[in-house]
Image (spheres, helix red, strand yellow):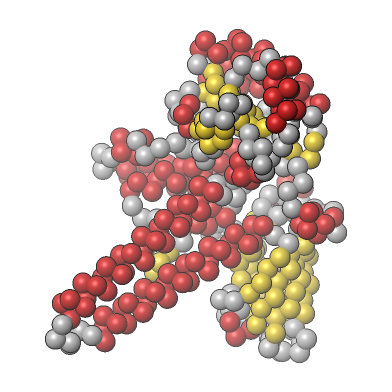
Amino acid sequence: MRKLLFALPLLLLWACNQNDSVKFEGKIDNADGKVLYLDKLHVASSETIDSVSLDEDGRFKFTAELEEENTKPGFYILRLSNGKLITLLAEAKENILVYSKSENMGAKYIVEGSKGSKLVKQLNDTLTLTKAKIANIRKQLEEKKNDADFSTVSQNLVAEYVEAIQAQREFSKNFIMKNATSLASYMALYQKIDENTFTLNENSDIQFVKIVASSMKALYPEHEYTKAILANYKTLEKRIANLNIAKMIKEKGSNFPDVTLPNTNGKEVALSSYKGKFIILSYWASQDVASRKQNATLKKIYNKYRSKGLKIYQVSVDQNEKLWKQAIDEDKLNWTNVCDLKTGSAAATRLYNIKKVPANYLIDQRGEIVGKDLFGRRLEEKVAEYVK
């Protein structure tokens, strides 16, 4: 199988850690005499993995050994004895490098070697800015409540408040759509503006819970966070049904991250245009032998089930137009084939966390992801379950 090398610096870091473990190291300035803890976060609890007393140098190094069945991504916390902390999203074999200062640890820090941890930092940094804006608006409202023109001032400030809240909501929604296959999106769902207000707190936001739940179910079916979000989704769904707005939820869009790329004629085709059909979302490369063999299997399945509604949306990671189109002609592929030749469809591969080809996702008629990387007989059997 052809490996997709997206980020050479990260791959070099991974090469340094080939065991099923996660390494955390770095430096916390101005922390002489303080204790640094490494905690593993669970859905409803946390456990301390290790700790170290920091000296004047502030350097630390932890290793979290992972059992074979627990090599899934997970949330960890670097927690200082002064109450400051940093949240990290780690995967097996990552070497995570962290630098901060004890007085503002968590508010300002640098992290390298972990894509998930960088996404978590992006989430927290954005929410921190939003909270600061809201706090400033509330402060001004309190300071100006006795002013003669308070009515006008308050209207303007309330407008700013609403704008800040909406900007945070839009950020959270866009973040989830761009990173639906990352556990960071789980965190995005449950961030709070204050103790009683989630950033996503409208009834229609259940669609984003469903998007993340669907992706996690396909990628990490036994993960404790997957089980938690599926249970939460069922609870929310019942609540929505009781409010008689289930129809509105269904009309809000697809339950899977959308992809829109040009086909062989240069026409933009969206994955969501096949909403309501059973879709095989296939990733391949024209010069990859395994991909070409998979095309033969896809042809057999497509010819058998196309009249019953099966759709194939195939994304190529090619950057050579001639070779891409030549392979399509040679394999006689008569379904939708798309590609961003400038980047090798990099955005579409990141969106679905594609690390090698061939790869696929199966999306049912309800828009839910019901399978991932099924090939040969297993693929045909899964299609047969849904296309009759």
Please indicate, yes or no, whether residue 339 appears anywhere in the rendered image. yes
Measured as percent of width and height from the top left, residue 249 is found at 35, 39
Residue at 72% across, 89% down? 32
Measured as percent of width and height from the top left, residue 139 is found at 32, 82
Q: Is residue 316 above or below residue 334?
A: below
Please indicate, yes or no, whether residue 65 appears anywhere in the rendered image. no
Measured as percent of width and height from the top left, residue 92 is found at 75, 54
Q: Is residue 268 above or below residue 50?
A: above
Residue 305 horizontal side relative to residue 34, left or right: left
Residue 58 horizontal side relative to residue 305, left or right: right
Foreground residue among 317 and 89: 317
Question: How many numbered circles are shown?
Answer: 0
Residue at 73% across, 22% down? 326
Residue 94 horizontal side relative to residue 211, left or right: right
Which quadrant of the figure has residue 121?
Answer: bottom right
Which quadrant of the figure has residue 104?
Answer: bottom right
Q: Quadrant of the N terminus?
A: top right
Residue at 78% across, 54% down? 8
Residue at 60% across, 85% down? 103
Foreground residue among 179 and 373: 179
Q: Is residue 139 above or below residue 128?
A: below
Foreground residue among 360 and 50: 360
Measured as percent of width and height from the top left, residue 172 is found at 46, 56
